[in-house]
Amino acid sequence: MPTLPIWKALHMPEMMRYAQAVNHALRLLMSADERVFMAGEDIGVYGGAFGVTDGLLDTFGERRVRDTPISEEVIAGLAVGAAITGMRPIVEMQFADFVVNAMDPIVNQAAKLHFMYGGNVEVPMVIRLPGGGGTGAAAQHSQSLEAWFAHVPGLKVVAPATAQDAHDLLIASVADPNPVMVFEHKLLYKEEGPVEVRHTTEPVVQLGEAIVRRSGDDLTIVAYSIMTVRALEAAERLEDSGISAEVVDLRSLRPLDIETVRASVRRTGRLLVTHEAPAAVGVGAEVVAGVVESDALDHLLAPVSRVCGLPIPMPYAKALETATIPQVDDVERAAKELMNA
């Protein structure tokens, strides 16, 4: 049986679930830098509400994997204090929704201290936020709040769609000197994909870089997080109908790589933006604005389209929840309508 050269074998991707990829990145970061520690509700003994931090307590001990009281404001405040005094905290909100209890230390402190102290203070902290719907967890445990934080100067926001990006963007977020909000969709934790595991904490992906997941000629679909997965499936179906769709995964929401989107629209002439969060004042609106404020507007052959979540609290009933969240069928249908516009 032929064997791979050793240099190729060392770089072969492993099939890994999204949650495992995050866990691997956390292990790498904590092993490489003693300043990195974790804090959150049930992240230690319990391994996190979604099992992402499983086993880390056994490896790194209670000093660096800290189970906290049920107080999100305390958790975020702890991270701010640790970050400005030289540590690299990674904190987990058990559900992204719970971050509303910690808005003051995040929005009024973490985002602003670097500027208010004339650049003499850095706040290198990461907040991991399991968000999104589809799990039947109802209105207080299923929100997509990323646009709130993308609106705040001083914060960075990422939303990885693949296991590889979940791994690499977490490493890049910890390396960044700014506070970074990492939104991880709960439904993606069990999704499996190829991951080239890193053995160094040197970032291989920069925050603020979108990626073209699929090339196409007829229209551009812009998405992030779980909607990237659904957009890719919709693009496969559209191919069967003779429609060539390009899929751009934003990955980073702040900073936003609008130039990659513009370049795609200049080629395809049509733009569809999709995200699970409601449309109003959402990331999609910023993407559309970034296109129409540029010369890419002159290349548009049809009005832009948005496929987003409904503007209602997330229902508990499965059928209603599914109807509230954009599905593959919705993206496919909107793309076909756009092609006929």
Image (cartoon, rainbow, N blue to C red):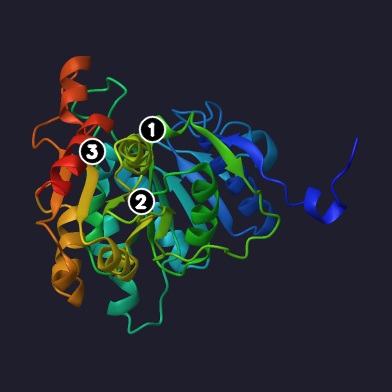
Residue for point 42% across, 44% down: 161
Label pair 2/1, CB-CB below 8 angstroms: no
Residue bearing mark 2: 76
Measure the alpha-carbon separation of dots 2 and 1. 21 Å
Residue bearing mark 3: 331
Amino acid type assigned to the residue bearing label 1 in the image: Lys
- SS at badge 1: helix
Residue bearing mark 1: 186
Q: Nearer the viewer, residue 270 or 252?
A: 270
Residue 256, image x, y percentages: 31, 65
Q: Is residue 277 visible?
A: no
Q: Nearer the viewer, mark 2 or mark 3?
A: 3
Q: Nearer the viewer, mark 3 or mark 1?
A: 3
Q: Which callout, 3 or 1, points at the residue further toward the start of the chain?
A: 1
Q: Is residue 96 left or right of residue 26?
A: left
Q: Nearer the viewer, residue 159 or 89?
A: 159
Q: Is residue 278 left or right of residue 50?
A: left
Report the number of numbered marks. Answer: 3
Label pair 2/3, CB-CB below 8 angstroms: no
